[in-house]
Amino acid sequence: MKESREIPDEIVEPARTEAVPALLEFVCNHAWEAGFSDERIQGIRLAVDEAIGNIIRFACCDGTAEIRISCSVNDIGALSINVVDTGKPFNMLVATSFPETQDFAKPGQPLSTRLMKKAIKNIEYRRDADRNILIFVVSRDAGNRHKPG
């Protein structure tokens, strides 16, 4: 069992593949601290991993952008995960609905949101101040959960 410890509310990393493990660990630690089950945390991890991968491949492909993730828990125990990047405008929630997807999706690197949408039902996107903002709101586990420590 993990020890309860103070974790920061936010992490900022370069939008590069090598930053993905730190970003995922940050989100998983927040989910664990919020009392989500290991199974639910794994689903959250897969969803955020898919989102970050899409951001790096399609919105921040020049390697100069950054990804900022913040986490908070609301009054009813839902975990809010805000993923903000400084890349070009990119709404991955609807990108696969348009034929222009072929313009930025290279062969062998298709855009995918399947895992993300399966694991987290409440996902929003907006563009504000030259940033892409993806917001995941993850409801509390209905069943088996551990008690935060």
Image (cartoon, rainbow, N blue to C red):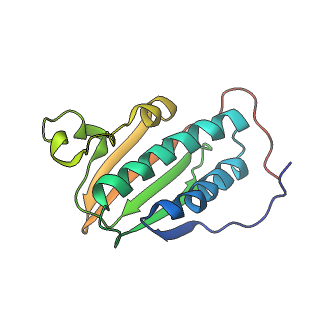
**Image height of 11 relative to 132, above or below:** below
Near-viewer residue (136 or 115): 115
Q: Is residue 20 left or right of 144 when viewed as pictured?
A: left
Residue at 24% x, 44% y: name it. 105
Q: Given the current orientation, which residue lies at the most extreme bottom position?
A: 64
Residue found at the far top of this picture: 143
The image quadrant that residue 66 belongs to is bottom left
* Residue 81 in the image, given as x and y percentages of width and height: 50, 52
| Residue lying at the far front of the rendered structure | 107
Q: Is residue 147 left or right of residue 90?
A: right
Query: Closer to the camera, 53 or 142?
Result: 53
- Give above or below for 68 relative to 59: below
As drawn, is 99 to the left or to the right of 149?
left
- Front residue (pair 49, 32): 49
Q: Is residue 140 visible?
A: no
Q: Which x, y percent locates residue 52? A: 44, 52
Quadrant for residue 7, please give it.
bottom right
